[in-house]
Image (cartoon, grey):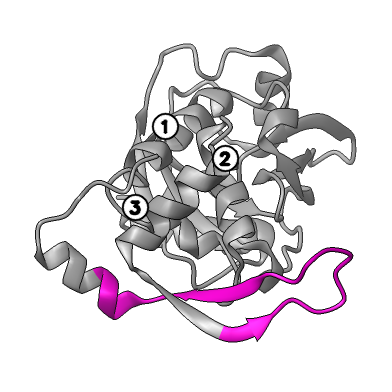
């Protein structure tokens, strides 16, 4: 019988952590280290095998903490990935041989994603992660395994979700300008949005609270700050409204 803390060689979790830097949507990626001291130039999503005594959410939280030091994130399950060839890249197979007891076993992975304000977290590499870095979505190259497909799926899920829920506010500071919100939606949707129409729709939704504060020390006319109003949002939801798309 397996020990309670044995790793399940056939099931893993991968985490897509998305953040916004006021201009670009970013994803948190790790650089892998090999157990024999060599380096690996392939970037990957933070992921690893699950333990036999863990449920998937517990595993996702543990793996994220072990590789990046991040904790207390709300992780949403995005889907399962089990293509028979997902471990077939030569560099991935070479890396697996240095860190897994059964590197040839077919692994099914469950993907989770989270939206965070990058200023609230300081990722720190650990375990087999030799580095942790935020990479703008448009600059992401060829990732390990099928992680490009996982990232694309999570981005699609995010774009579908913001059409019915204002989830993008998780990526912003508590106080933000309408310009920041506009840039965020353009970054998520990967397309330009007419500024005037965007602001008109946001203000019509009436889910923001205008603050008696403005930007300071900026080279342009200071913009007003706003906050997301959860109470107004809940009242809007109660009316059956579900179209937050742009």
**Looking at the image, residue 166 lies above or below residue 190:** below
Q: Camera-side residue: 174 or 77?
A: 174
24 displayed left or right of 207: right
Task: Assign a secondary structure to mark 2.
Answer: helix
Residue placed at 19% from the left, 66% from the top?
236
Count residues near mark 2 (Cα–Cα under 10 Å), then give few for <14, some for 14-19, many for 20+: some
Mark 2 and mark 1: Cα distance apart in space: 14 Å
Mark 1 Cα within 10 Å, few/some/many (few <14, many 20+)?
A: some
Instruction: Give the structural element (helix, strand or loop) at label 3.
Output: helix
Q: Is residue 145 magenta?
A: no
Write the start and end of the magenta stretch as one range.
212-233
Q: Which dot marks residue 56?
A: 3
Along the line of sight, which residue is nearer the eye, 115 or 236?
A: 236
Say whether residue 215 is magenta.
Answer: yes
**Frontmost residue, 204 versus 87:** 204
> Which-is-in-front pick, marks 2 and 1?
2
Quarter of image, res 26: top right
N-term-proximal mark, 3 vs 2: 3
Q: Residue at x 27, y 75 (%)?
A: 232
Instruction: Identify the mark at residue 156; answer none if there is no mark.
Output: 1
């Amino acid at each position: 019988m397996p020990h309670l803390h044995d790793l399940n060689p056939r099931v893993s979790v991968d985490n897509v952590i998305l953040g916004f830097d006021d201009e670009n949507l970013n994803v948190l990626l790790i650089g892998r280290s090999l157990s024999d001291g060599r380096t690996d130039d392939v970037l990957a999503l933070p992921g690893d095998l699950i333990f036999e005594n863990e449920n998937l959410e517990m595993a996702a939280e543990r793996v994220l903490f072990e590789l990046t030091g991040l904790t207390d994130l709300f992780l949403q399950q995005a889907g399962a990935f089990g293509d028979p060839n997902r471990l077939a890249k030569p560099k991935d197979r070479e890396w697996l041989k240095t860190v897994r007891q059964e590197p040839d076993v077919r692994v099914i992975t469950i993907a989770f994603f989270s939206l965070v304000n990058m200023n609230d977290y300081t990722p720190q590499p650990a375990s087999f992660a030799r580095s942790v870095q935020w990479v703008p979505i448009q600059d992401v190259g060829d990732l390990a395994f099928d992680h490009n497909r996982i990232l694309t799926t999570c981005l699609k899920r995010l774009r579908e979700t913001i059409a019915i829920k204002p989830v993008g506010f998780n990526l912003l500071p508590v106080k933000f300008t309408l310009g920041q919100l506009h840039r965020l939606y353009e970054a998520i949707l990967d397309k330009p949005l007419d500024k005037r129409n965007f602001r008109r729709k946001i203000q019509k939704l009436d889910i923001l609270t205008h603050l008696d504060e403005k930007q300071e020390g900026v080279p342009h006319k200071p913009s007003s700050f706003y906050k997301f109003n959860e109470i107004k949002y809940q009242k809007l939801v109660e009316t059956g409204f579900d179209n937050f798309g742009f």
